[in-house]
Every structure is written in structure tokens, then in C-alpha cells.
Amino acid sequence: MDKYLYGIDFGTSNSAVSILDIEKNEIITTISLPSILYFSSEQSHSKPLKYYVGQEALDKYLAEGMTGRFMKSIKRILPRKNFTKTKVYSKDLSASDLITLIIKELKERADKYVGISCSRAIIGRPVVFDEESVNDELAQKRLLTAAVAAGFTEIRFQHEPIAAAFAYERSLKTKERVLVADLGGGTTDFTFIELNPSSKENADRSKDIIASGGIYIGGDSFDSAFMMKRGVPYFGYGVKYQSMPGKFLDLPLSLFINITSWEKLNFFNGFKIKNEIEGYYVFSDRNPFVKNLITLIENNLGYQLFQSVEKVKINLSDLDTTQFYFSQFEIDINEPVTIEEYNKIIKRDLQKISNYLDEFLLQNNITDDSIDTVFLTGGTSLVKSVIELFKNKFPNSKLNSGDNFTSVAKGLAYSGYLFN
């Protein structure tokens, strides 16, 4: 029997592995890294792909002048049945192939820490990868394939908000009924669960889980909404091109939808697309904003652009005003954004989260007075308007939070009962 058990949280923005010493029932460390892949521009057709993961991927991407293939938010392609593979230089890679590289990196780092190869892992998954069940099943199957390819032979899955609840339980002195809201980059998940310090060693926790549900909206949705409102005008949105003599049309909306999310931008750099945009540039009388779109794609600037978008979100968690600033390769964006403006931009997604939560509580007969604590976790739970949403919805409940980036991995490692 393995001495260790790994809890692996493969996240949209960040991933983590917590190492549980099974004999002591203690987590000995948690290792985290950004969910980023970079395939070097220096490749050999006769050798395996040269790639980097996490912070090293970002460092190499910048060191090589952003010339290779950079990928982020890969988790969002898991339920996409129309995504079968992408060509990275001369190799075809599936969704599982890409995710394997991140999980394998986590496993290798953890194995190096403990000095042995661990075969057992509990891997987190959102309550819903996708609102269509067939896509949800596909997503978990792809994640399982990736975990096996990474070297695990004994694998269980746990819902991420349940894992976060088990991590929170370790801090409790008395029994509580807790509504866990796990707000990540790709999804928002809810679990209503009864937690008790005396139950943490129980072999079966299924009876403590009262209800679970989720919606396919997260921090990336906020970033996409912001890009669509404030970013795309700098890349040709609203510009007209001459489709034939005397006839002018707007540039296709699909161009801009593809640059408003990492999930699409990862794969929006094909030869056909570049030629198409070059044509629009010529027939828009060489409009400088269309030129910006060409520059964005040709120079692989998506990561820097979305860092600027995300910085707006992060800054407005503490400030009332910030700057949307991006300056690269003659693309210059520098404009103020207020918290009121930002809240209007993300209002639709916030309302969807709010409406789903109301429905979740109603369907499961969960009343305000039956909730002792609302526990928020995940990076998106730091957004000011998200916190306000929960404060307004649960004025009589205690609002609490833990480590927003590692609590899920820790709770997964504490979910060893799934192997019993």
C-alpha cells in the first residue's frame, strides 16, 4: 500500500498537488503552479516536443521573444467535443495530451519531494464541466485519460467544492452546516454539506453531502466580457471593409469572439486565419486597429493582453478606479476603468450566478436560517462584486474563506475515504 496519497486540483488558471501522509493523516506539503504550457520555438522533427510547464513556461516564452506556442486555460477545452486535436509543430495533440503534461509535472514534483513514485490520486472536478451531460462525461473521461498517462494507476474523482469543504472542516471546533461556493476561472460550484470535526476520520462522508450543483461561469467569463466591451475596439471591432466596389460590411463578429477567451485564442493562429485577416486589413483601407489584430496574432501577445485584462479585475478588488493598460508592438491601450463600469460589464454573468444559486437553494429546500457558514474559495471569490453578492444574499450567515488557491487540493488529499 502506498505511504502517500496525492490530491490534484487541475485548475483553469492554477493547479496544485497536496501530498497526504496516509499513516499520519497529515498533509506534508502543497505544490502549486500556473496552468500554462509553452512549446519552444526550437524543435526537432525527429525528437519529442520540447515543452515547459508553469512559471518556467512563462519565463521561456518571454525569453524566446514569444515565438513559440503558448497555451493557458486548457481546462476549458475538456468538455468541448468539437475539439479533437491541435497541431503543435509536427505533432497532433489531443485535449488529454495537453492536460497530461501539466498533471505529469505536478506528479514529478511531488514524487521528487517524497522520494518515491506515488500511484494513488484523488483528482478534483467541477460539479459541472458543461451543462450538457454528454459533454460532462467526455470531460471526465479526458481527465482520467490524462491522469493515467501521467503515471497514476489508482484514481478517484471528487467534486471541487466538497474538497474545499473538507479543507475548511479542519479548522472547525463545532459542527456546522456550510454552503461552499467554489468560484474558479471556468466554473462556479456549490455544495451544501454538514461538517463536523469528529467526522473527519470517517470512512464514508457521502451522507454528510446534502446537495451539489454548478454553472459554467467563472473568472474567465468576466475577462471575456471585459474584452468584448473594452478590448476588441482596439483590434478592429466596428471597422468596415469593402466586400465589393461600393459595398461595405462590418468585420465578422467571429474574429472578435475568438480573441475574447483563452479557450479560443489558444488555437486562433492558423495560416488560413492569418491570410483572412490580412485580406480584411487591405480592404479596410489598412485600418490601424485591424493591423493591431494582425500584430496580436503574429507576435503571440495573447498572454500579455489577458494579463492586462486580469489586472483590471484584480485591482478593482481593492480600488475604485484603475487603468486598462497594454503597450506592445505599437498596440497602445491606456484608459481608466471604474468599479461601477466594471460591475456593469460583468453584471450579466453575476446575475446568472445569482439566479443559479437561487434555483439551487430552492430545489434543495435550503433556507437562510439552515446555513451556519458560507465558505468562499477560488480566485474569483476575491472579486469585490462577487463578495457583495454573497453578503447581500446571506445577511444572517457568517461569510468565511480559506486559502483561495490551495484549499481544494488539500481537501482532495483529505478525501481518501473514496478508496475504501
Image: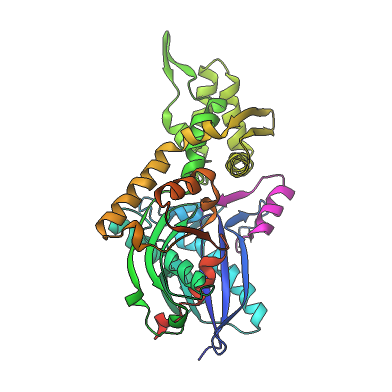
Residue 5, percent across and down?
A: 53, 81
> What is the number of callouts on the image?
0
- Quarter of the image where the C terminus is located: bottom left
Q: Where is 400 relative to 413, above or below?
A: above
**Residue at the spot 58% in from the left edge and 23% down from the top edge:** 289
**Residue 53 lies in what quarter of the image?**
bottom right
- View extreme (right): residue: 63
Q: In screen coordinates, is 118 left or right of 140?
A: right
Residue in view at x 26 percent, y 60 percent: 365
Could you tell me residue 65's position as x and y percent? 72, 44
Q: Is residue 112 above or below residue 340?
A: below
* Residue 161 horizontal/vertical position (percent): 43, 64
The answer to whether residue 164 is above or below residue 276 is below
In the rendered structure, which segment of residues is drawn in magenta? 48-73
**In the rendered image of this protein, does residue 371 appear above or below residue 413?**
above
In the image, what residue occupies the spot 37% across and 64% down? 192
What is the quadrant of residue 352 in the picture?
top left
- Is 119 in front, or is 203? 203
- Residue 244 visible in this rendered orientation of the protein: yes
Residue at the image point whose x is 56% and y is 64% from the top:
101
- Residue 400: % across, % down: 51, 60
Examine the rendering and report whether any part of residue 149 can be seen. no
Q: Is residue 59 magenta?
A: yes
Q: Nearer the viewer, residue 126 or 88?
A: 126
Looking at the image, residue 163 sits to the left or right of residue 51; the answer is: left
* 150 and 232: which is toward the camera: 232
Magenta highlight on residue 256: no
